[in-house]
Image (tube, grey):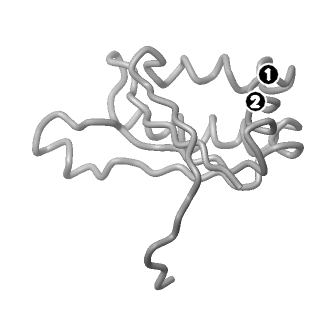
Amino acid sequence: MIKLIVAVRKRADMSVEDFQEHWKTRHAQLVKDNPATERYVRKYVQCHTLSDQYEQGEVAFDGTAELWFDSVADKDAFFSDPDYLRDIQPDEARFADMTETVFFVTEEDTIVDRI
């Protein structure tokens, strides 16, 4: 199992509230309902920067997304799937600054798990 972590920067012309609302609702629903997600994604999690962090100054990122896949091949297939390209990818630019958003592929190694 591999995990893609996406460190997301909001578009500069969006408020934090508008960014989070769009990402949590519209984009989340697009991902959830997409056939490519059904085929390739095992888990999808959004992590939003806490509002009090903005009060302390500029934040490193506005949130992260975590997507689990069975393999790197499945990750690649998801991001090249016509359903993803038609429905999900165009929406990303509506809320995220894709030039400042960072993608990296990881393999999780749990050290402590008290959940």
Figure label count: 2
Q: Are marks 1 and 2 in contact (CB under 8 Å)?
A: yes
In this image, 101 relative to 2: left or right?
left
> In the rendered image of this protein, does residue 22 appear above or below residue 96?
below
The x and y percentages for residue 23 are 53, 37
Between label 1 and label 2, give the one nearer the viewer: 2
Q: Residues within 10 Å of mark 1 (few under 14, many from 20)?
A: few
Residue tagged 2: 76
Residue sitting nearer the eye, 111 or 54: 111
Which residue sits at x=75%, y=29%?
A: 76
The x and y percentages for residue 37 are 80, 41
Residue sitting nearer the eye, 72 or 11: 72
**Element assignment for label 2:** helix
Which amino acid type is marked by label 2?
Asp
Which amino acid type is marked by label 1?
Ser
In this image, 83 relative to 16: left or right?
right
Tell me where residue 14 sits by quadrant.
top left
